[in-house]
Amino acid sequence: MDVTQPWGEAPTPYEEIGGATAVRKVVDDFYDLVDAESPPLRAMLPRDDSTSREKLFEFLSGWLGGPRLYEEKRGHPRLRMRHLPFDIGRPEADEWMRCMQAALTDVAEPLQGYLVVRFRESADWMVNRPDPGVIVPTVT
């Protein structure tokens, strides 16, 4: 196989994964795992998570190089700003990553590995509180 991109042969990760149907499956698998296995993440979501599912689908579609659905409907994603109301430390970022990585099990390599690295970068960027025991320097 002649891999021309870090995610595979297709011009974009969106095409490599299989388009809208495959992105929707990853999103649904992710939220199904959150619902079934992750009380800390589930507590951050509204009771009806259908809007959250749709927003993640729209965001990932554009983030993966497909249609920019999220931006067309809602403007710039401003991910960190939109997540600031939630208390996100290392444990929450790791739990999000665990669920997302499990949702990617049907995604073939090298795309799966590429996405795990990229999702980890995003999860790390969402952390907005120091972990217990971490000393945060103060300016005096």
Image (cartoon, rainbow, N blue to C red):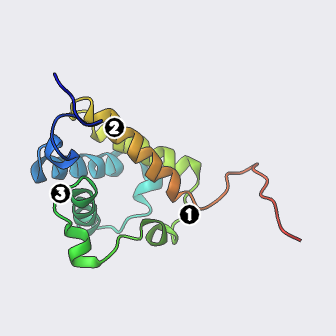
How far apart marks 1 and 2 lie (CA) works out to 27 Å
How far apart marks 3 and 1 lie (CA) works out to 30 Å
Q: Which residue is mark 2?
A: 114
Task: Specify the label residue 66 is tagged with.
Answer: 3
Q: Nearer the viewer, mark 1 or mark 2?
A: 2
Task: Specify the label residue 87 is tagged with.
Answer: 1
Badge 3 density bin: few <14, some 14–19, many ≥20, Cα 10 Å: some
Disc 2 marks a residue whose amino acid type is Tyr
Q: Nearer the viewer, mark 3 or mark 1?
A: 3
How far apart marks 3 and 2 lie (CA) works out to 16 Å
Q: Residue at x 26, y 36 (%)?
A: 111
Residue at far top of view = 1
Disc 1 marks a residue whose amino acid type is Asp
x and y percent of residue 129 in the render?
Answer: 63, 60
- Asked if 83 appears above or below 29 in the picture, the reply is below
Sequence-wise, the earlier of marks 3 and 1 is 3
x and y percent of residue 39 in the render?
Answer: 44, 52
Please say if the residues under marks 1 and 2 sit with CB atoms less than 8 Å apart: no
> Going by the image, does 103 lie left or right of 19?
right
- Disc 2 element: helix
Task: Specify the label residue 119 is tagged with.
Answer: none
- Disc 1 element: loop
- Foreground residue among 51 and 82: 82
